[in-house]
Image: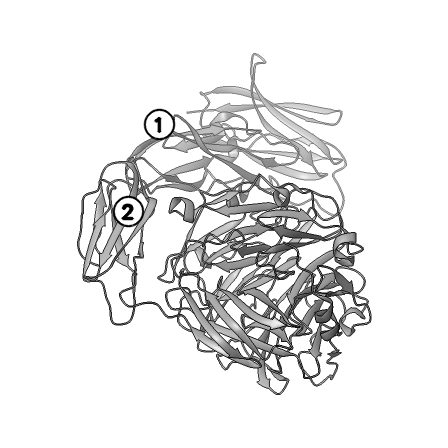
Amino acid sequence: MRCVLPLFAAVLLAPAQPPFTRITDPAHPVAADAAAGRYAGAAWVDVNGDGLPDLFRNRTALFLNAGSGQFSVSSSDIGQGLRQTQGSGSSWADFDNDGDLDCFISGGSSALYRNDGGTFTRITAGVIGDAAANAGWACAWGDYDNDGFVDLVITFPNGFVGVPNGPLPNHLLRNEGNGTFRRVLTTDVTAGLAPYTVASWIDDDRDGDLDLYIGSGPAGSVAKDFLYRNLLTETGTAHLQRITAGTLANDLVDGQVWNFIDYDNDGDLDAYLTNYGGSNNNLYRNDGGVFTKLTAAAAGPIVSGNAGSLSNVWEDFDNDGDIDCFVTRDAGTSLFYRNNGDGTFARIDTSAVAQVNAPHIGAAAADYDNDGDMDLYVTAHQGANELYRNDLPPGRGWLKFSLTGTLSNRAAIGAVVRVKAVIGGTPYWQERTVSAQNSFNGHSSFTLHMGLGDAAQADSVRVLWPSGFDTVLTAVAKDQTIALTESVPAHTLRARFTYDIVTEQVPFTVHFTDLSFAAPGSSPVSYAWDFDGDGVTDAGTSSPAWTYTTPGTYTVRLVITDGTASDTVRRTAAVAALPSAPVLLFDASPVTLGTVSALAAFADTVFMVRNEGKAGDTLQFELSYGNVKPDSALLLLPVSAFIGPNDSATVTLRIFPQRIVRVFNNTYGPKLRIRSAHAGTVLFEKAVTFRMGDLQSARPGPAAPAEYRLEQNRPNPFNPSTVIRFSLKESGPVRIRLYTVLGEEVETVVEEEMPAGDHSVRYDAARLASGVYLYRLTAGDFTAVRRMVLVR
């Protein structure tokens, strides 16, 4: 519901403008950093675990916080060599739960960089290492299946990023917990193409699993955004299904970034969406689960006069106990909105963060100088990026929270902190969420900040961990950073596992690996695996193997116990066992063979087909001759072949240059077709292009011949080849045809444009019978006929 401050509270906590100071010292590496990339974001992260927020500016700049407001430039090569396109996003998390934050960068090519104690290693293996296949715009880590390992979504904005293998759908990569990822395709998130922009994970319905909101603005017009409900709690299986009901799902917007915040401190999450050119930004008040779109009359200028927006960053910049908003725009100045505490916002145009007239893209907040108020970093498209220090005077209290997961993912992505304090005489609950994507192509610090106004302490602090456990503190003194590590009760077990094969033809063996969690002092003492969903235990060891011999889709269940407690995990449709069948691989891309010698007896090119399936197939090789004449000028060897499982077959295309009838452009284009008996159709078609070598044996002299002339072939009689010589007075089309003595045409020997000069052509008559033949030259108005004798 809507909350209004009493009059005495408003007087006690009179609005104050956060006094931001732009850092302009040219010796300061962050202040001197130039704009890079059209739509590049930024993120505040503690990459070296020293408790100070470092700064990453997409795609390649990492600034290490040295304390006292100073930074140094990291020598890391993170982001180097990636294909650059319009958008560049980053998202940080501890994907391998080893205690340091890793980075994924999305763009024209995308990459994961593993943090190995302060140095970064690019991961090139597996699904996550396929830079081209994972191309996109923005990326976001979130543990959507609640297994303690963060998963990754990458958005691809159809029509805005050109990649050689595009356009692409979105990508959802499930973290297997062993350093590898699996591509998830059975979800609405990865179905279809749209101008997907920035994705944000948030448990907006508070059911214990992360939902997904993707801004999908067409950039200049309006459409519905793409919002997805996670059905993990409802069904036991993490599955993202598009939301089709309600105001948020059906409003026509030009959506960029969704954020869910409790701006009115009434205990439920409200929503804010920045829009690009199609409309102003939207603020939705949550009234007990029903969202109301607010007008400027109800909320103030935060929903008007701000088209062209990109980032929205929510923090309590003035430490008065309610959350303020900073918005970047692709043109003009950025916008700063102060929360008035009565459900409305005031636009503060005099703030330093709203003074620079330039395209601003990304923004991220952190208390980089550790003085208790939130500072800002803004990426620009022109000029320099901007660092703003918040110089809020002392007097208003604050708390910061640094969280570490144990059963939950190590970076505590998705954890929620709720703080209750009496501010201005009225008790309020404030709420913040650890997010790895809450701005445009980036995110703010994982250290959560709360302003306490005039409160001397927080009466209650509750941390809701993604695991479902919580941590409760009381009477917490103000003005401190609290580091909390998730604690779990004794005998807590969480069954988890991974496996190496998802889909394969029978028979095949899958190796399963236990990744279960046990609270300190406890460990699983028994395992019960059901690999085929029949309710019968198939194995009792921690990491067994199972061979699938019958086609089908199988659910796998693991039950673990420690003698006191137990836990069960099911992976629905975990393994797909396919019938044995051939799986043919062939490079069907067009090929150019170059120039084939006109004097060669034949020229061979070999093509290979590979069968990676578990059943054989019979292949038929066919030719489409195109403009090659006669058909006898090309030959396939063989015309059919059997290819066994895990085997290969070759087919040779043989060209007989001396048989080919020349065409004017001297370029020939047959096609090779491969027909599968198993499939009952043509599976592959490959275009082949080649040219014929020059027919001339002598170059024209300084002057062209004075006349056209056709000479007697030599040798004559001949067997099986002979040379025909002729002279051309002028350049032009030339035709030489062969006839029987009865005037029946046998074939065309030459038909092409030729320059003036002396020429010769070798003719191969190996396929003709002995006898007397006539050959006729036609060039312009000139015609001549001579006789040749073939003797076998």
Asked whether residue 133 is in view, the answer is: no
Ranked by sequence position, the earlier of labels 2 and 1 is: 2
Q: Nearer the viewer, mark 2 or mark 1?
A: 2
Asked whether residue 317 is in view, the answer is: yes
Residue drawn 48% across and 24% down? 790
Taking depth in this image into account, of 168 and 152 the one nearest to the observer is 152
Residue 677: numbered disc: 1
Q: Quadrant of the C terminus?
A: top left
Image height check: is 19 above or below 693?
A: below
Location of residue 293 in the rendering, given as x and y in whole percent from the top left corner = 69, 48
Q: How many marks?
A: 2
Say which amino acid is labelled 1. Answer: Ala
Q: Disc 2 on helix, strand or loop?
A: strand
Say which amino acid is labelled 2. Answer: Val
Q: Is residue 275 left or right of residue 154?
A: right
Location of residue 784 in the rendering, given as x and y in whole percent from the top left corner = 67, 24
The residue positioned farthest toward the bottom in the image shown: 68
Image height check: is 239 above or below 104?
A: above
Q: Disc 1 on helix, strand or loop?
A: loop
Residue 556: numbered disc: 2
